[in-house]
Image (cartoon, rainbow, N blue to C red):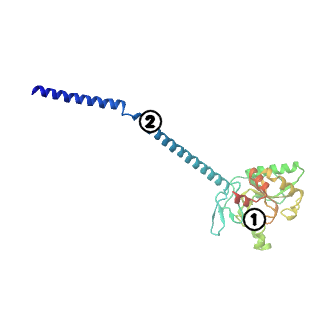
Amino acid sequence: MKKNSSIFVSLVMMTLLISGCSEKILNAKGYPGQSEVTSEVKADTHNKDAKHSNDQMQNNVEQAKQSVANTSDENMKRHTTDKNQDGIQVVFNPESIPVLVNKQNKLPENYKPADLVYTDIPFVSDVTNEKRKMRRVAAAAVNQLFAGAKADGISLLAVSAYRSHETQTTLFNSYVNRDGYEKARTYSALPGTSEHETGLAIDVTSGNGKCAAENCFGGTPEAIWLEQHAAEYGFIIRYPQGKESITGYQYEPWHLRYVGKELALEITSKGITLEEYYNEV
């Protein structure tokens, strides 16, 4: 009996030892085909991670493109507006160089450019000090324009540059008293909607002072020179002939608006107005 018991115990011990060894061997070597399956799982996981990474990168690229587009749109459309109580749009960023100011888009109340400086060009004799100023970048550009004209044998005089809101109010009211409201609106801007209030516009005339802000200035050597060369200095003829229904104003070959050289060349080469340019953007 004892002998049988010993034999039984020995068999049990051997079975346990063999079982333990088998488990260790399996743990060490894995089951048949495990390495292949593990490689496939790892490869699949890698592919999924790579795809996720690529998708994330593409998403980041698209977001970056959209951000650039939005930034570009914001920069180019600085005239973006909000309606005031009169239904006229009020520009958000009046300091922007290409800001659109017209009968539908006005400057904020009490706006005054912070960088007004005196220009270094000849004016007609009765111009006040205020009207001799422009924003710094525009003043530098108009100084160069006058110098360029002189080098080409063209003599120019400035008539009026910057106007404060108060000055524009007085001027517009005087035109209304003289010609009536509707007529005055065809050639003069309501206070707040005048480009002169931006400090980026200037009226010029011939060196002899004749035809100042008059239709007879059109067709003169000075007007022709401006049509051909103003854009080289960053200016456009703001109210060109044949565009009255778009600008809302009659032809004014003497009214120059600074928008920057690149934009001025584009607008002039296309033969469009500032309004049409923004409609294209």
- Labelled pair 1, 2 in contact (Cβ < 8 Å): no
* 60 and 21: which is toward the camera: 21
Task: Tell me which numbered mark, 1 or 2, is placed earlier along the sequence.
Answer: 2
Which of the 4 image quadrants contains residue 1?
top left
- Residue 216 appearing in the image: yes
Between label 1 and label 2, give the one nearer the viewer: 2
Amino acid type, callout 2: Ser
Task: Give coordinates of residue 142: x percent, y percent.
Answer: 79, 52
Q: Secondary structure at mark 1?
A: helix
* 21 and 87: which is toward the camera: 21
Q: Residue furthest left?
A: 1
Amino acid type, callout 1: Ile
Report the residue at 73% width, 63% height from top.
Answer: 194
- Count all numbered tags in the image, as a single digit: 2
Horizontal relation, residue 228 to residue 63: left or right: right
- The residue beneath circle 2 is 39
Report the residue at 26% width, 29% height from top.
Answer: 18
Task: Give coordinates of residue 150: x percent, y percent.
Answer: 87, 50
- Residue 206 appearing in the image: no
Report the residue at 58% width, 49% height from top.
Answer: 62
Check residue 246 in the rendering and tell me which mark sits there, or answer none: 1
Which of the 4 image quadrants contains residue 250?
bottom right
User: Is the residue marked by circle 2 packed among few (<14), some (14-19), or many (20+) residues within 10 Å?
Assistant: few
Real-space Cα distance between discs 1 and 2?
70 Å
Instruction: Report the quarter where the C terminus lies.
Output: bottom right
Q: Secondary structure at mark 2?
A: helix
Task: Give coordinates of residue 125: x percent, y percent.
Answer: 84, 58
Report the residue at 69% width, 65% height from top.
Answer: 104
